[in-house]
Image (cartoon, grey):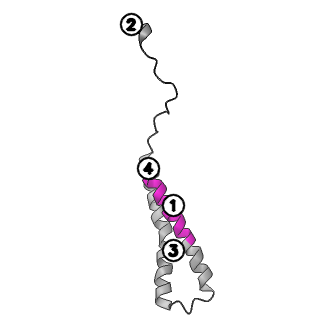
Amino acid sequence: MTNDQRPSEPTDQAPPRRRRDVVTTIVMVIVGIILLLPGVCSLFFMSAMGSGSAGPLGALWLICFAISAGGIALLVKAAN
């Protein structure tokens, strides 16, 4: 087989994935864990106070759970 008969290589290959920086991943994990803390505290206080006496604290608990959801999303992003 000569060079003229060799099949050409496909040119539509995706470029290789760039490796993620280790420092960036570590920072993402640390910030994600910190963002989980408000949700953990909210769960603790919800269980300590009971569900009947939530009152105006219910909105604060929802905000804390939203912050924790952001922490979970950041941890998932760091894992991928």
Q: Secondary structure at mark 2?
A: loop
Residue density around tag 2, few if under 14, some if 14–19, many if 20 or more, within 10 Å: few
Q: Which residue is mark 4?
A: 23
Give the amino acid at mark 4: Val
The residue at the far bottom in this view is 52
Residue at point 46%, 59% (across, down): 75
Identify the mark nearer the N-term, 2 or 3.
2
Residue density around tag 4, few if under 14, some if 14–19, many if 20 or more, within 10 Å: few
How much space separates mark 2 and mark 3, taking CA atoms? 68 Å
How much space separates mark 1 and mark 3, taking CA atoms? 15 Å
Say which mark, if any, is on residue 73.
1
Q: Which residue is mark 2?
A: 2
Residue at point 50%, 85% (across, down): 46
Give the amino acid at mark 1: Ala
Q: Secondary structure at mark 3?
A: helix
- Viewer-proximal residue, 6 or 54? 6
Identify the mark nearer the N-term, 1 or 2.
2
Q: Secondary structure at mark 4?
A: helix
Say which mark, if any, is on residue 38.
3
Answer above or below: position of 8 versus 4. below
Q: Position of residue 49 (x, y in %)?
A: 50, 90
Q: Position of residue 35 (x, y in %)?
A: 50, 67
Answer above or below: position of 50 versus 80. below
Which stretch appears magenta?
Answer: 66-79
Identify the mark nearer the N-term, 3 or 4.
4
29 part of magenta stretch: no
